[in-house]
Amino acid sequence: MKRYFINQEGEANKFWNIEIHDSAYTVDFGKIGTLGRKNQKVAADAAACAAEVAKLIQEKQRKGYYEVAEGASIPEKLAPAYRPMDEELFWEILSLLNWKKTGNDDAVLLPAEKRLAALPLADIFAFEDILAEKLYRLDGEKYAAACYPGQHAGSISADAFLYDRCSVLCNGPVFYETVVQDPAQWPVGLEFESLLYLAGNAYTRKTGQDDFPHTPRVSYETGSNTAGWLPME
């Protein structure tokens, strides 16, 4: 008996089919609309084969695949409707960061990077502008004091404070606005430098070019928001 599965979650548009032949099974998989690829594996016996197939099916279902009947009509995968970059889309893209891959920053960024790379270049640049503005808003002595309790502003690493500000954005728009209004809510000890490379990675994925050709309207570098810092003594 052959079983048929598809996955059309997010950017996915894939099929995965599996069929048991006594102590062996065959898998067909690939992008919907293509012939895909075929793999076959032989197990120790029929019971072992059935157990392995059951495990594979469970893994696929956890990844978003669902079963369809043989010969069933596969729904057409429509491209997401175009929306110009704004704050809502900015936060939506950040919500795609895959924290299950913590420890591998490239893997954490990948879903958001792919979504951003699917947009026009103007929107990738606009994303970088919004990112810089959000980080600029957190650039100030009261935020640094909350991030580094008990430390004098003059002893704080400019780079480290920038990376710490990135972590506030990674917690979403509600948390971000909470911290803006109440610095005491700062997530002390968290940083995510790689957020700074998201737009550049998306640009490279889209164009094949490494040099990101856009400078944000404001600088996110620590100390750029001079109104947020008291004169140093």
Image: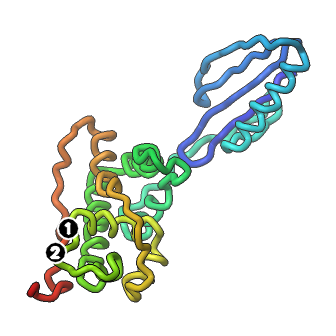
- In percent of width and height, residue 199 lies at 30, 53
Task: Check the image and report above or below for 14 versus 154.
Answer: above
For this view, does 215 lie left or right of residue 147? left
Q: Given this view, does label 2 or label 1 mark the residue nearer the observer?
A: 1
What is the quadrant of residue 72 in the picture? top right
Q: Residue furthest right?
A: 47
Whether tag 2 and tag 1 are in contact, CB under 8 A, the answer is yes
Q: Position of residue 164 (x, y in %)?
A: 34, 67
Q: Residue at x 84, y 18 (%)?
A: 20
Which numbered disc flags the more N-terminal residue, 2 or 1?
A: 1
* Position of residue 204 measured from the top left corner of the image (x, y, whole percent): 28, 41
In this view, 211 is above or below 94: above
Instruction: Tell me what residue is drawn at x 38 percent, y 84 percent.
Output: 183
- Residue 8 is marked as none
Other residues around mark 1 within 10 Å, as few (<14) / some (14–19) / many (≥20): some
- Residue 55 drawn at (x, y percent): 78, 32
Residue annotated with mark 1: 158
Q: Residue at x 32, y 57 (%)?
A: 193
Q: Is residue 63 above or below residue 130?
A: above
In space, the residues marked 2 and 1 are separated at their CA atoms by: 8 Å
Please state which amino acid type lies under the numbered disc 1: Ala
Label 1: state its secondary structure: helix
Question: Foreground: 126 or 179?
Answer: 179
Where does label 2 land, which residue?
223
Label 2 secondary element: loop
Furthest-front residue in view?
A: 150
Of 27 and 6, nearer the camera is 27
Residue type, mark 2 in image: Gly
